[in-house]
Amino acid sequence: MAALVAGNWKMNGLAASLGEMVALKDALARQPAACDVLVCPPATLIAQAAGCVKGAFALGGQDCHASPKGAFTGDLSAEMLKDAGASYVILGHSERRHYHGETSEAVAAKARAAWRAGLKAIICVGESEAQRNAGDAPHVCAAQLDESVPQEATSANTVIAYEPVWAIGTGRTPTSAEIAAMHAHIRSSLIARLGAGGKDMLILYGGSVNPGNAGEILGLPEVGGALVGGASLKCDDFLRIIAAVNPA
Ligand code: PEP
């Protein structure tokens, strides 16, 4: 399975930012990526972005509601994201878990909604700094996986993102040995839970990935790509991260 480098723009980007998408499309036409590329802009930009990038890379949402439609003011369904041009949706990002009280059970319901709409779910897990310091990171992530990843998950419909909360947007990352150990642990948890379906499911690393550290992180065992926040906002930085993926 090809590696995936995914950009999470979070709540950043106006119509003027579509220029970054066009620049990315043009650059990938000149120098094709050795991995799959995904950008998850704010939902307001997905349809316009789809018109600009014309399939040069995938587009995704950053959250969805579990229901296909209904009286849920302010929410968006997975079907709406798909209709706008998305093929992925990020679910259970730590900012959603923290600021919106999203539980792992809610994330599992959203994953099923994503599949119902024909989207791939990127399910995020990761420990807080206190949990890491207490030696609880493996246990916390395994519990989040158990509760957030439905039993029907396969490598065709789901990607896992390991994102230590304390590394997101801080410029701090775990050591390479720590990332490799967590990815190995996540792989065995997925296999224990899903059997063969867990063997080749992509596990992305996310948390302060930048052009300077991408090569080392992306070369680690069981790291199937990266989920990139801040460094995905500028096409040049994002391209340098994409270029750090070694051809399979
Ligand atoms: C993220 O928000 O998923 C993320 C990894 O952010 P950053 O790369 O800015 O740490």
Image (spheres, rainbow, N blue to C red):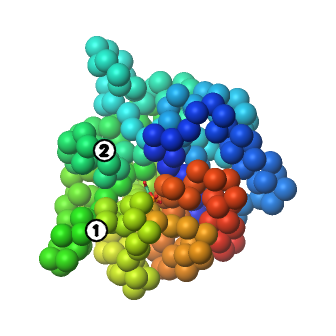
Please tell me whether mark 1 sits on a helix, a strand or a loop.
Answer: helix
Observer able to see residue 162: no
The residue that appears at 29% across and 19% down in the rendered structure is 72
Quadrant field for ligand 1: bottom left
Give amino acid for label 1. Ser
Front residue of 115/235: it is 235
Q: How many marks?
A: 2
The answer to which quarter of the image holds residue 190 is bottom left
Residue shown at 80% from the left, 48% from the top: 26
In the rendered image, the quadrant that contains the C terminus is bottom right
> Looking at the image, which residue is at 72% across and 33% down?
52
Q: Quadrant of residue 168?
A: bottom left
Task: Give the amino acid type for the residue marked by disc 2 in the picture.
Answer: Arg
Question: How far apart in space, not on screen, are marks 1 and 2 (Cα)?
Answer: 23 Å
| 121 lies above or below 52 | below
Look at the image and tell me in which quarter the N terminus lies.
Answer: bottom right
Q: Position of residue 19 (x, y in %)?
A: 71, 40
| Residue furthest out toward the right | 30
Residue 58 as seen in the image, left or right of residue 181: right
Query: Which percent across, then down, holds residue 76?
Result: 40, 26
- 202 vs 174, nearest the viewer: 174
Q: Outermost residue toward the left?
A: 134
Callout 1: few (<14), some (14-19), or many (20+) C-alpha neighbours within 10 Å? many
Q: Which residue is the site of mark 2?
A: 96
Q: Secondary structure at mark 2?
A: helix
Residue 126 at x, y = what percent?
30, 62
Q: Is residue 134 above or below residue 16?
A: below
Residue beneath disc 1: 189
Mark toward the viewer: 1 or 2:
2
Furthest-top residue in view? 71
Q: Residues within 10 Å of mark 2 (few under 14, many from 20)?
A: some
N-terminal label among 1 and 2: 2
